[in-house]
Image (cartoon, grey):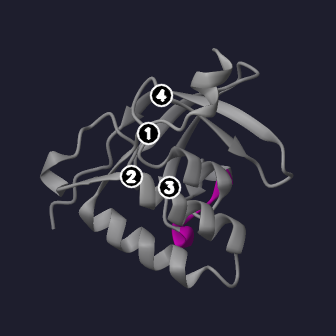
C-alpha cells in the first residue's frame, strides 16, 4: 500500500440513530476518556450519515461482528459494542476504545491507520462484516 493511500482516511458511513447515540456517548466521555472521545467525535464529523433503512450489511455498525487483519497478518474476529457490553474475553470490543473507534463505519475491504493505547500507529483491513442481529421487539 502506498503512503498516500494509507495516510488518507477511508470514507465511513453511520446510521442516524447510531450517530445520535455515539455523539452522546463521546460527549459524555470527554472528561473521563478525552483522547478516545475526541477521536470518536472526529470520526463522527467526517462520516456520511444515512437513514437506518439505507444501512448496508457490509458496513461496521454497533453490534456488527467484524473479521479484520492487522498489518502483521494476524486476523481477529470481534463484535463492536457499547461500553456496558464490552468484554474482551468474549471478543466484544467497546466503541470507546481506539480500535472500536477505528472500526466504526468501515466497509468490507477498507483499511485504516489508527493509534493504539500505547501510542503505536497500526493499520487494519476489514475482511468481513456480519450485520448486527435483527431486533424483533
Q: Which residue is mark 4?
A: 110
Decide whether residue 86 is among the magenta residues: yes
Q: In screen coordinates, is 7 left or right of 120? A: left
The mark nearer the N terminus, 1 or 3, is 3
C-alpha distance separating marks 1 and 2: 10 Å
User: How far across and down, in percent of the image, does residue 88 sit?
Assistant: 66, 53
Q: Main secondary structure of the magenta part?
A: helix
The answer to which quarter of the image holds residue 29 is: bottom right
The structure residue drawn at horizontal position 15% and vertical position 60%, both measured from the top left corner, is: 136
Do residues under tags 1 and 2 come within 8 Å of each other at their CB atoms?
no
Do residues under tags 3 and 2 come within 8 Å of each other at their CB atoms?
yes
C-alpha distance separating marks 4 and 2: 14 Å
Residue 106 shows which numbered tag? Answer: 1
96 w.r.t. 99: above or below: below
Residue 59 shows which numbered tag? Answer: none
Disc 3 or disc 4, which is closer to the eye? 3
C-alpha distance separating marks 3 and 2: 6 Å
SS category of the residue bearing label 1? loop
Magenta-drawn segment: 83-88
SS category of the residue bearing label 2? loop
User: How far across and down, in percent of the image, does residue 39 sit?
Assistant: 61, 60
Q: Which residue is mark 3?
A: 43
C-alpha distance separating marks 1 and 4: 6 Å
Do residues under tags 1 and 4 come within 8 Å of each other at their CB atoms?
yes
The answer to which quarter of the image holds residue 107 is: top left
C-alpha distance separating marks 3 and 4: 15 Å
The mark nearer the N terminus, 1 or 2, is 2
Q: Which residue is mark 2?
A: 47
Amino acid at each position: 500500500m502506498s503512503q498516500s493511500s494509507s495516510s488518507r482516511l477511508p470514507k465511513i458511513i453511520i446510521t442516524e440513530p447510531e450517530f445520535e447515540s455515539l455523539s452522546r456517548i463521546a460527549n459524555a466521555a470527554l472528561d473521563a476518556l478525552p483522547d478516545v472521545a475526541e477521536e470518536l467525535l472526529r470520526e463522527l464529523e467526517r462520516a456520511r450519515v444515512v437513514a437506518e433503512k439505507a444501512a448496508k450489511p457490509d458496513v461496521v455498525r454497533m453490534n456488527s461482528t467484524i473479521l479484520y487483519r492487522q498489518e502483521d497478518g494476524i486476523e481477529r474476529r470481534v463484535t463492536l459494542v457499547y461500553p456496558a457490553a464490552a468484554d474482551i474475553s468474549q471478543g466484544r470490543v467497546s466503541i470507546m476504545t481506539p480500535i472500536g473507534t477505528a472500526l466504526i463505519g468501515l466497509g468490507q475491504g477498507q483499511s485504516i491507520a489508527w493509534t493504539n493505547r500505547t501510542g503505536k500507529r497500526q493499520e487494519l483491513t476489514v475482511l468481513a462484516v456480519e450485520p448486527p442481529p435483527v431486533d424483533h421487539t
